[in-house]
Image (cartoon, grey):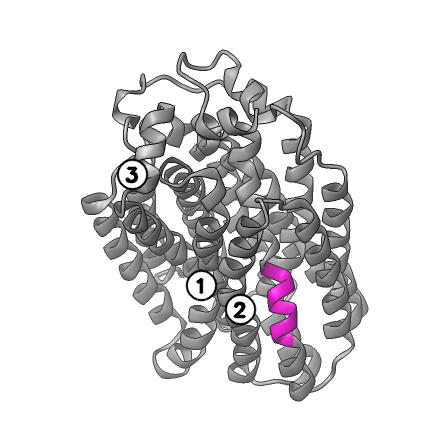
Amino acid sequence: MTVGSTSVAARRPYRWAVLLLSWAAFTMTAVDRSTWGPASVAVGEHLGVSLAGLGVFATGYYIGYVISNACGGVLTDWIGGRVVISSTLFAAGGFMILFGESTSAALGIAFQACIGFFAGCDYSAGVKLISQWFRSEDRGFAMGVFMTATSLGTVIANAVVPSLIESSGWRASYHVFGVASMAVAVLCFAFLRNGTGAEREPRRLPKVGPLLRNRDLLLLGLAGFGGLWGTYGFITWANALMAKGSGLSPVQAGGVVAIFAVAAVAAKPFIGLVTDLFGGRRKVPTVLVLGSFVVTLLLFGTADSLTAYLWIAPFLGVAAYVYSPLMVALIPQLSGVRLAGSAAGVTNAFWQLGSTVVPVVLGVVFQATHSFFAAFATLAVGPLLGMLMMLAIRENRPGHSAQIAALPTIAEPAPLEGKKEG
């Protein structure tokens, strides 16, 4: 996409429709992913899986998710965000329905891996579409709105799934959200468009070598790994840990996690807007948020009552989520718009390794220690690592985006942000 077409697209009101549909698709994959947390105990009892074994289901999902992130970003830069976001969401919804029909642990793990495999493409496709339709100086707010999907998905799942399980069984929750995902996919296919000028880009596989040699993107990958270790470790295990460790009912535990996620829904676009107003600086706010995440995880680990959990949950929710839009807004700044899909996919694939490993690690730690605090101290190691990695990123290196965009991937003018920042 040329500089001129980027500028024109960034002023069109239709860009808000792009943001809305991308957000809706990402929200549904977040709901699909978060359904496992409140449903896990019921699924385990039905399929005869131990508490420690429940982590394998989440790990199966994230294995598929990591693979699709690594490939989905490249696919998005090749064939466009519209086709990728709609087709993969439709398939993910279909496998949600099939998981609801699982009759064995092995089959369930396989279906979880398939859900993750198709769900993982929506993120990079959404980042690509938003990067095409929004200017660099407006992306903090847009990415903040887009990233509310992850926390809102947790809210919806924890608000709806426990009641669905009580009234209709755990299978109903997977059937309901599977159908909803497929419906949103149809809307995306019907109404989404790639950025102006994207149809004139050659359909050629992008070369990701320059991204893999980009020191700051690699550091961002490590930082996101640590952040998501804490965030999705909490989402995956908090319900079961509060139920087993503190005796909370599934509805009470689901309420705590829902409050945890609600707090981030407003905070994500707010922090993106603030960083836009102050020149688009993302590094220092991200470091501060990750440090707060470490502290609030440790505080939650010392709590032992429903009242204490309810007080800490909103602060933990803000800290556990608002670093993500800041990191995502950095991606096209470091890679250029042309490779934004590939860069988002590659970095998120590395981020999601934290989500892949932590369910099993946390299950082993809790099984061995039976300590609620030990589990949350294990979670806090992740954002501590992320904070240290963010400190090493060179956010304002002159000409960074222009240099990356100018590397021989596809012959076209450098993207808008490269022109402005170089």
Find residue 194 and report its image quarter.
Answer: top left
Closer to the camera, 150 or 277? 277
Label 2: which residue? 261
- Horizontal arrangement in the rendering, residue 406 relative to residue 309 (left or right): left
Q: Secondary structure at mark 2?
A: helix
Residue named by callout 3:
82
Q: Which amino acid type is shown beneath numbered disc 1?
A: Gly
Res 371 visible = no
Image coordinates of residue 79 in percent, x first then y, are: 32, 27
Image coordinates for residue 343, horizontal then vertical, percent: 52, 32
Total numbered circles: 3
Q: How far is mark 1 from mark 3, CA to CA?
A: 21 Å
Up/down of 187 relative to 249, above or below? above
> Which element is circle 3 on?
helix
Q: Residues within 10 Å of mark 3 (few under 14, many from 20)?
A: many
Q: Quadrant of residue 120?
A: top left
